[in-house]
Amino acid sequence: MYTLKKSLGQHFLKDDTVIQKIMQVLAEDPFTTLLEVGPGGGALTRELIKLPGIQFKAVELDEEKVAFLQKQYPVLKGQIISNSFLDIGKPFDESFTVIGNFPYNISTQILFKILDWKDDVPVVIGMFQKEVAERAAAKPGSKTYGVLSALLQPYYQIEYLFDVPPESFNPPPKVMSGVIRLRRKKEILKVHSEKAYWMLVKTAFNQRRKTLRNAVKSLFPAAALTERVFDLRAEALSIDDFAALTFKMNGAEK
């Protein structure tokens, strides 16, 4: 069989009911190309490889798991990328759906890496630590709304789908998990520049207890800072609010 490695944050899904719920969600959007991140022991993989007419690849860092999967499922020969997801290049030339029980210790980094490929990734279905899943899907005004929410949501509509309890995994994690779906938006948020938007969001939430005026004053001319929106804290602003402010930042007129 194989060993479980704490250093890689391995908690392998074993609950067939959860696996079938994930498969039902996957079937709601059309796709022909699929990438699984972190197949581990193959509980989800064994269902994915049954899908007809699908070009499939998986990314797995743990060489022991790669050897196990290829032995257990010979059809996977040549279809597993033995590397960290964070270090690979784009795995397909065409658009592809991403799915996985994402390693919790790098799950936020995985989402930001997917943003690099956003034009080619219309759908993502992922299992995360519940706290991370909630932050990704959070709406303005909530305590969970923050950098992750405001950087993902310009590009993706994000739904929190369902909880997954610790006993659904081997070994059970100490936290609740959650499954979310990201669907790429058809209309792109209008910003002065993507760089300006990211800088504004990160700066605003870096000091989220302060009013926007105090948190981001270095990014704006003094005249702009008199507007009432700067009386608010970052968590009160929607992505549209942040986008509108990028046109008022220092250098935006250039």
Image (tube, helix red, strand yellow):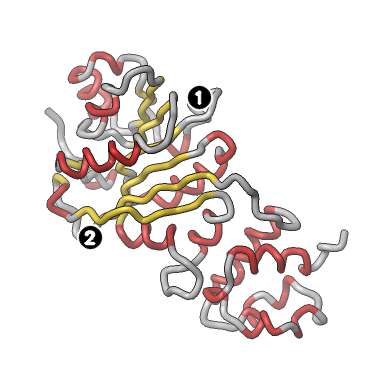
Q: Nearer the viewer, residue 88 or 5?
A: 88
Give the crowd class for mark 2: few <14, some 14-19, many >=20 residues within 10 Å. Answer: few
- Can you give x and y, in whole percent of width and height, for residue 142 in the image? 44, 73
Q: Amino acid at mark 1?
A: Phe
Q: Amino acid at mark 2?
A: Val
Number of other residues with Cα within 10 Å of mark 1, as a class: few under 14, some 14 to 19, many 20 or more: some
Q: Secondary structure at mark 1?
A: loop
Are dots 2 and 1 in contact, CB under 8 Å? no
- In screen coordinates, is 168 left or right of 137? left
Residue 3 percent location from the top left of the image: 15, 36
User: In the rendered view, does 38 fall on the left or right side of 197?
Assistant: left
Q: Residue at x 22, y 47 (%)?
A: 6
Q: What residue sits right under mark 1 in the picture?
A: 92
Disc 2 target residue: 175
Image quadrant holding the N terminus, namely: top left
What SS does tag 2 mark?
loop
